[in-house]
Image (cartoon, helix red, strand yellow):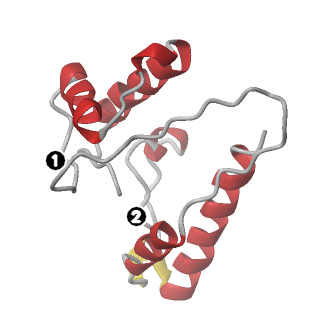
Amino acid sequence: MKVEFGDTPNNWKLWNALVLKWINDPTSWPNDTNQLLGQMIGISPITKPVHQPSPKPVRITQDDDTAVRFLLPSVKAVQDGKSGLHGNNEAYPLLTFYDSAFANHARHGMQLNEMQDFASSRIGEYTILECQ
């Protein structure tokens, strides 16, 4: 399941604030998608509806520094992410908060194989950065 909200720098700041709250206060973790949506709406109207007709459990885990842990995306998440790539000399679909790191440089066009390679690199980066 994917949680989505409008891709704006302000929405990312709000989402990041919620994640930091969870990091610092595990008692605030939502138990299901209804609670998650309530928390997201509570910080700002940043959400699109969660794409589920009925509540689903929410699993949040916090690292305890006792083991090396890899957090891997699901096969479906990888497939869904790559299915949105077209590569017809279009810019890779990075989220808006990346713009600040690159001083708003123009995004250049990529072919499909370049986009797929870049997507795989981002999955690898995500996995290694989450490795503890």
Identified at 65% across, 50% down, the residue is 71
Horizontal and vertical percent position of residue 14: 33, 26
* 100 and 97: which is toward the camera: 97
The residue nearer to you, when weighing 103 against 1, is: 1
The tag on residue 93 is 2
Amino acid beneath label 2: Pro
Residue pictured at 28% horizontal, 49% vertical: 4
Q: Choose between 30 and 115: the one closer to the eye.
A: 30
| Marks 2 and 1, the one that precedes in the sequence | 1
> How far across and down, in percent of the image, does residue 47 sit?
20, 40
Q: Quadrant of residue 15?
A: top left
Q: Which residue is mark 1?
A: 49
Q: Secondary structure at mark 2?
A: loop
Residue at left 62%, top 77%?
A: 117
Q: Quadrant of the C terminus?
A: top right
Q: Amino acid under label 1?
A: Pro
- Secondary structure under the numbered disc 1 in the rendered image: loop
Relative vertical location of residue 65 with respect to residue 3 in this rendering, above or below: above
In the rendered view, would you say 24 is above or below 81?
above
Query: Which mark is on residue 131?
Result: none
Within-10-Å neighbours for mark 2: few <14, some 14–19, many 20+? few
**What residue occupies the far right of the structure in this picture?**
67
- Few, some or many C-alpha atoms within 10 Å of disc 1 (few <14, some 14-19, many ≥20)? few
